[in-house]
Amino acid sequence: MIRSVFGPAIAIMRRLKYPRKFLLLGLIVLVPQILVFNQYLNKANEDIAFSSKEQLGLVYLEPVNELLRLFHHYFVLAPNVALIDDPVVTEAFTTLGRDITKAIAAVDVVDKLYGEELEMNEAWGALKSDWYRIQPTFARLPLGSRNNARDTIVRNSLRLITRVGNNSNLILDPDIDSYYYMNAVVTKLPILSQYLATINATATEAMATRGLTVGSTTLLIALEESIEFSLQTDTDAFAYVFEANPSLRDAMRPKLEAHVAVISQFIGTMERQILGRAPTFSATTDQRFDYDTPEGFYQASADTINQMFVFRTFISEQLVALLQIRIDGLISQLNAVFVVTGIALVVAAYLIIGFYLSVRQTIDDLAEATRHMIQGDRDWVYAPATQDELAEVAFSFNQIANELVGARDQALESARAKSSFLANMSHELRTPLNAILGFTGILSNGMVKGGAKLEQSQIDLLHRIEGNGKRLRDVINDILDLAKIESGHIAITATEARPRQFLEETIGTVKSLVVSKGIDLELSFTDSAPEIVLTDVRKVHQIIVNLIGNAIKFTHKGGVYVEVSGAGSAWRIAVRDTGIGIPQDSLKNIFDKFRQVDETDRREYEGTGLGLAIVKNLADALQGSVHVSSVAQQGSTFTVTLPQRLEVKDV
Amino acid sequence: MLTTNPEDWRILLVDDEPDNLAVLEMVLSYSGATVTCMRSGQAALNTLRQNSFDLTLMDIRMPVMSGYDVLKAIREMPNPEQSDMVIIAITAHAMAGDRERMIEAGFDGYISKPVEVPTIMDTIREIVENHLDQRNLIAG
């Protein structure tokens, strides 16, 4: 079941070598990982860039706010300097002009640095040119135009601040803590400063002219209400921040309370002194100032505005710090991800390479074990270094190796025992045969000193004993040859020789056999037959004599035809006869030992059945082969194929 | 003095099988050679020490002392007439390679059993001729 489900995967894995397997798996796992990681990286970098831009915005806002503060003072003082006619105020006004120029230069610096990124160049340029247009004539303008000019500059300053907030992401910041900070810095406090400035201007002017118009009164009351409301909402908002983030509370609360107290005090005093009514906001009079004189009131008012800007700067610094913490957090998170991912990748690569090497090691060990096994090193045991599934392969390998070594040893031992037995047997057979043939030869050749001459019939009988004895000797010879070959002690002596010459001689030695039988024996050479071969001539002779002897034995008419030809780097000797042939089902076993086509007791043809086994063994020893083809009743062809140049091995 | 004429040969024949000893003795005697038969290696060595021979024909597989042992003992004898004599192995060890092994061991010739009665004398004469040729070659 599981195998059928995973069939295609198994097929793919079987086709791939190990390094490619790992590469494929690695890619499949890594690619999505990299995509996700990349996504994360982009997101983190975006977040960092987002917050960094907020910080930029806050940096940009610092000189702008300073300029706004100075503008407030300027617009209050410009129309009133003459009216108040106080040397301190006049001196302050002169200083103010220079301060504004310095503040403009400071904004120019940040605008040059960050204006482009925050898209502020144009707006800042416009405000600056407005200022330079209005400034020279501002003090002399009629009231209405003066108010308009003042409103243009202040409104554009506020817009500039809002624009910085917009373009630097401050307004977009999703974080609740930074929202209230941002709201204070970008929106609330600049407007509050505007309210305070307007109160300052209106009240100072009213006191200087000793006339508080209904319009002025209404305006002051409205502003006073607005400021009170604004302070209330700010306090509530920060209370919420503190609740959400108690750690801010300790740093923030005293500053916030001081801020509220200073403004409340000013408003309260203003209500009592200027509007002549009980303060709606609980506050005590600040004893530093004399609210009854225009310059005293101006100083108190200006001081309050300055205090408010100090608070604003504090909030801004808090916001910068908050953003820095966030950026640091993001960076360390990013670094942590980098380190963890890097370590994971290195460890994975390390383990994968280790995995591959362990597999490789096991395979190399197996290969070496196989080599040892082939070389017959029976003491060598393959001890797998691995404990995984491959160890099972190794275990099986060892089992097979043991069985094979055992089987081979047994086979070698039995072959050796057999060879030894055959050699002994032949020795024991030859010894009495020597006496039989020897005495028979002595008798039939009349070699007995002083012995009587034998009659012809007696000599005939002796010849028959002799003939049978020799047949027995031939059988023993065959057995000996095979025993010798199979014991592996066959010595090959390669010499260069001419087949035309030595095969002619071979045929000569068996010629007598066909003469008595009345069949042909012919030797022929095709054009491709090699002139010279490097081989063991005596072994070739033995092969051919055996094949011809066999052919003659089974051929009663026609003849035996030996044909020699070349075939590439080999050469062939084909022994064809017109004999009784071999049945198809006997062909495949024909080269086995002790095998005769007719194995019954009534068989017609004598023989040990060793001849073809000897031929095959000799052909193998000569690095060649022997094949047979046959048609029953028409004849057989035995073809011996041998290399033209025997490869001489050092043994 | 060794010649190629069998009638001049004094042959020491060693074989533990009496019948084989008899066959060879009859064939060799028939050719006119003087044959002394011994049924063991030790007996052959004893005889050799007391008598002179031109040729030794010896079986290989014998009890106590094999043909190889006897060969070695003869080759180590101090008298060059004995140690350099022609020694021929006549054996039923007739496997391919046996001839080479025995020639290498120091036999001057090799004849396999069963022997060919009509041609054995020719074979022995050939071995003797070879021996004489080689000796002349060395003598220059």
Image: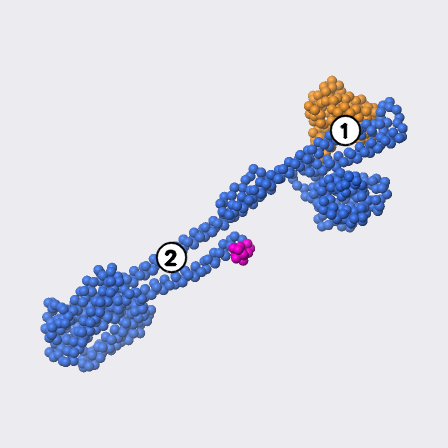
Chain colours: A blue, B orange
Determine the residue located farthest toward the top in the rendered image: B50
In terms of sequence position, does the residue under pointer 1 or pointer 2 come before the other?
2
Q: Is residue B83 left or right of residue A407?
A: right
**Residue A139, relative to residue A373: is it above or below?**
below
Q: Residue at position x 71%, y 48% from top?
A: A569
Circle 2 residues within 10 Å: few <14, some 14–19, many ≥20 = some
Quadrant of the rendered structure where residue B136 is?
top right
Judging by the rendered image, the residue that carries numbered circle 2 is A337
Let me know if residue A527 is in the magenta part: no
Residue A225, x across and y down, in percent: 18, 74
The residue range painted magenta reads: A1-16
| Chain hosting mark 2 | A
Q: What crowding class fits label 1: few (fewer than 14 Cα within 10 Å), some (14-19), or many (20 or more)?
A: some
Is B21 situated left or right of A207 in this image? right
- Looking at the image, residue A135 sits to the left or right of residue A602; the answer is left
Where A379 sits versus A175, above or below?
A: above
Q: Position of residue A144 (x, y in %)?
A: 19, 81
State the residue in front, A110 or A160: A160
Q: Which residue is mark 1?
A: A432
Q: CA distance from mark 1 to mark 2?
A: 98 Å
Image height check: is A162 above or below A409? below
Res. B127 in view? no
Tell me the chain of label 1.
A
Q: Nearer the viewer, residue A205 or A260?
A: A260
Q: Quick one: quadrant of the C terminus of chain B? A: top right
Q: Are marks 1 and 2 on the same chain?
A: yes
Q: What element does badge 2 sit on?
A: helix
What's under tag 2, amino acid-wise?
A: Val
